[in-house]
Image (cartoon, grey):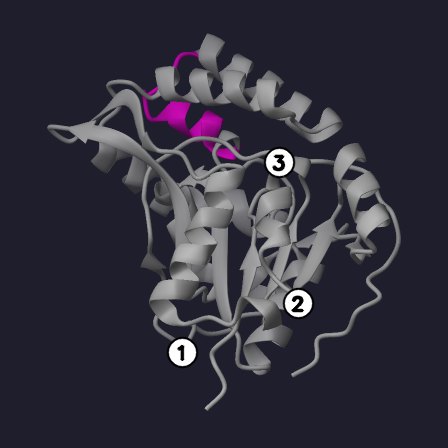
Amino acid sequence: MPRPTAAFFDLDKTIIAKSSTLAFSREFQAGGLISRRAMLRSAYAQFLFFTGGADHDQMDKMRAFMSQLCAGWDVATVREIVTETITTIVEPLVYDEAVTLIAEHRAAGRDIVIVSASGAEVVEPIGRMLGADRVVATRMEIVDGKYTGNIDYYAYAEEKARAIEHLAATVGYDLAESYAYSDSVTDVHMLEVVGHPFAVNPDKELRRIATTREWPVLLFVRPVALRRHLPGPPTRPALAALAVGGAVAAGGVIWANRRRRGLEA
């Protein structure tokens, strides 16, 4: 019997058009979790994320900002806010091209795995909306139902690749026949471990690497409401989560050329 295969997707600026965590800053303020000043800072971080991409140093600063920001937050309150507002916040940000691509992979029998540096309080509900099979995400330390501000597990850069390899060993994925999609040079390691890597809306450095290695480059430009594509709930079990928590993901904004490699079934 052939081994199972998967399509691994980064989340922010690959499936959705913003940082999934920072997109909720206004709702977190309305829920009493952050101040207006903190909301403005998160909006500024979102602007930098969108306009210039994020290198390792910027990601470290954003990670530190988000981990300090959520210190003391009640975990149940965060999950409640995300659950109540995810439709209005995230659904219009989902890329039409990404949803179509996910549907093609599912039709070809591949598992859908979201691999994100953002937290499961945000990533898991989005994964359920997309009918994903598994989620890899960052873990924030929780004590007595509240975030401490410390990070237990950071699903970022090389760690994404290690997580994918761990899943392959556990589930039996044939990585040589699997696919991966990301927008950021920080995810090069994730793209390298599969046989079919794709750069999506790549930042400048990832575009250069993709060109050198002849990786196909995709342009996703049409955010749409997810319900247009998924009229009913997914039929497959959703989200065997590898990790939970909260942070931010990296991104990029530069277009190269259309994909040159088909999705062979």
Label 3, secondary structure: give it.
helix
Q: Residues within 10 Å of mark 2 (few under 14, many from 20)?
A: some
Judge left or right: residue 238 versus residue 53: left
Q: Nearer the viewer, residue 190 or 81?
A: 190
What residue is shown with label 3?
Answer: 186
Q: Looking at the rendered structure, which numbered label has been put on residue 235?
A: 1
- Start-end of magenta stretch: 23-35
Q: Amino acid at mark 2?
A: Leu
Residue that carries the numbered disc 2 in the rendered image: 101
Relative placement, left or right, of 238 versus 100 is: left
Q: Residue at x 63, y 52 (%)?
A: 192
Furthest toward the bottom, the residue is 1
On the question of residue 76 being in view, the answer is yes
CB contact under 8 Å: marks 1 and 3: no
Please provide percent x and percent y for residue 82: 37, 41
Give the side of residue 205 with respect to residue 37, left or right. right
Circle 1 or circle 3, nearest the eye: 3
